[in-house]
Amino acid sequence: MPEGVRATAKAYDRSSVKTAARSGKEIAAFFDGLRPVDPGLVMLSRWRPDAQVLAGDDRIGMYGGVALKP
């Protein structure tokens, strides 16, 4: 969702909150050497989908993940 990411980044640039748009591959690098917890690094809507967030609804445009130190 490149256009949505650009629009969000511009909005954050105008605020006091600092953020950085990263690809899934760039985010995955933060998990190097760790043991991922299911379902791994995925779009937030796929982490714990329920009636409010349908599985596969990736309009949120953010990744989430949890991992354990070995």
Image (tube, rainbow, N blue to C red):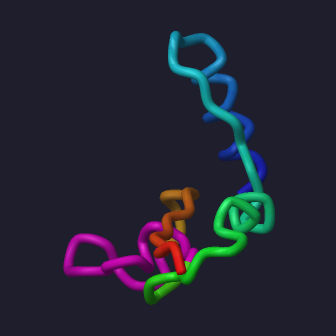
- At x 40%, y 77%, the residue is 47
* Residue 49 on the magenta segment: yes
> Which of 9 and 16 lies nearest the eye of the viewer?
16
Q: Position of residue 32 (x, y in %)?
A: 72, 70
Compared with 62, 34 (above or below) is: below
Report the magenta residues as a range.
41-57
Q: Percent x, y for residue 49?
A: 31, 80
- The residue shown at (45%, 67%) is 44
Residue name at image x 49 percent, y 65 percent: 64
User: Is residue 40 covered in magenta?
Assistant: no
- Farthest front residue in view: 70
Percent position (x, y) of residue 11?
59, 23
Q: Quadrant of the C terminus?
A: bottom right
Residue furthest toward the left?
51
Q: Nearer the viewer, residue 17 or 8?
A: 17
Specify the quadrant that holds the N terminus. Answer: bottom right
**Residue at the image position 68 percent from the left and 24 percent from the top:** 10
Q: Position of residue 21 (x, y in %)?
A: 71, 43
User: On screen, 6 above or below 56?
Assistant: above
Please count the marks in the image: 0
Q: Is residue 6 above or below residue 36?
A: above
Front residue (pair 33, 20): 33
Q: Please identify the dominant SS of the magenta region.
A: loop
Left or right position of 39 against 22: left
**Relative vertical location of residue 7 with respect to residue 12 in this rendering, above or below:** below
Q: Quadrant of residue 50?
A: bottom left
